[in-house]
Image (spheres, helix red, strand yellow):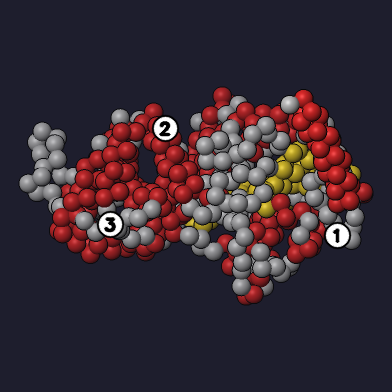
Amino acid sequence: MFEKVFKNIDDVLRKESGCGSELDYVEQTSWIIFLKYLKDLDIKNSKYKELLGEEHQNIFSDDFSWETWACPKNSKGEIDYNICRSGVDLITFVNNELFPYLEGFKSVEDSSSIEYKIGVIFSEIKNRFQDGYNLREVLDLVDELSFNTSEEVHEMSHLYEARIQRMGNAGRNGGEYYTPRPLIKSIVNVMDLKVGDTIYDGACGSAGFLCEAFNYLREGPNSSMLRAGDLEILQKKTLYGQEKKSLAYIIGIMNLILHGVESPNITRGNTLSENSRDYEEKDRHDVVLANPPFGGKERAEVQQNFEIKVSETAYLFVQHFYRKLKANGRAAIVIKNTCLSNGDAKALRKLLLEKTNLHSILDLPGGTFTGAGVKTVVLFFDKINTGTKKIWYYQLNLDRNLGKTNPLNSRDMEEFERLFKTKGDSDNSWSVDVSNIDVENYDLSVKNPNEKEEEPLRSPEDILEHISILDLESSSLLEEVKKLI
């Protein structure tokens, strides 16, 4: 049923002149679904408080509750079209009354509360509907969605993930919004996450890493050992993120909510504008999981926040993540493969080799990130001052080209996950002793010693000589054919 509702919403959005792309579709669907979710959350919390004999306070005042402005019902529980807004009246109310009211929640002092996040979200996005009748249709469709059971929320999370994937594939820089889920799951699976770890992504985008980490801790191999208080720890004291862009911010919050995190600890802001040298122990985390933006550039004043001053955004993020890790903390970071050899990243490689244990590098094939147009690697390191002694490489070699119609899947990652634990050698994996690395360049390029050497290219002279021989053979054969005729 939910899948049909989402399809019908897309059909309406295609008619809406204010929505011209998949990015608009996801953004506009998100804020409406978010408000419907909050309505169902109020109902759930009200029932819980009633069982405890306590009074419940709704998030919104009556005039701005879902059942008042969006989908008022009659005595039969059906939408009452005699009193509900539509057309120009609906657009005017949403733009001039609803959004300013919701934006006002930003004044709430508790930045971890759902109320504060409501204020941040609605101060960052705009209603793009221009036709109030299209908006009326979407509201009616979203009203059919339900967040009352874990099964419903689970189904919704899958459908929402599919929308994010479509948005990522449609955008020029797909990796900015969507990191392939099989890759994220594989990374999470090998990171040995435990309840009590704090997990951080300072470039969280649509929060794929945080969602998958939450799933792993709640439903993974150690989930049977969860105690009564562990769920509250997972909800409030485990997942932390930050995101610069408003669209990605609302998508990330919505994605975490649909995965079961009721009030996500995601802040809105430019992570790189923080002075990384000012972090205290309370600001640091046990685990970093991240895919920072590809190919961005930062201004000189932002670079002043870092010891290694480079314009490449991803290189600044790696420094940020290093600073955000606790002692003995561990990280997995997706980054362009040029960081392994690029001259601008030499000081960064030196930092990782001398100040961390850069124990593993996963080399991904081209096409892993649809639309991004770059080759990537994943750096795995632990924040240990003894430095790196040996690096284990794994080169993901597939028997097909990756793309929109043939994406990465979980089977592709099985050998990597199996070998990661023991750092075993295979046709696709090998280890390099750091003492053998050229310290002049700190070149960490992926050079698989198991690859068969290609035959050397022939010289132009050899090629011309071979062509001449073939021409003579052809002429001789042609003369014999003529004689037979």
Identify the secondary structure beneath mark 3.
Answer: loop
Judging by the rendered image, the residue that carries numbered circle 3 is 17
The amino acid type found where label 3 is placed reads Ser
Q: Position of residue 237 (x, y in %)?
A: 54, 45
Residue receiving disc 2: 154
Residue 283 shows which numbered tag?
none
Figure check: 318 above or below 427: below
Task: Name the secondary structure under disc 2.
Answer: helix
Task: Return the x and y of residue 466 as percentages of the image width and height.
Answer: 86, 42
Q: Quadrant of residue 226?
A: top right
Foreground tag (3 vs 2):
3
Dot label at residue 441: 1
Q: What distance separates the C-alpha of mark 3 from that of mark 2?
A: 32 Å
Q: Position of residue 295 (x, y in %)?
A: 62, 60
**Amino acid type, residue under disc 2 in the picture:** His
Residue 485 in the figure: left or right of residue 50? right
**Quadrant in the picture for the N terminus:** top left
Task: Judge from the rendering whether residue 340 lies leftward or rightward of residue 398; answer left or right.
Answer: right
The answer for how far apart the CA atoms under marks 1 and 2 are is 48 Å
Badge 1 marks a residue whose secondary structure is: loop
Count the labels in the image: 3
Residue 436 vertical placement versus 122 (above, below)? above
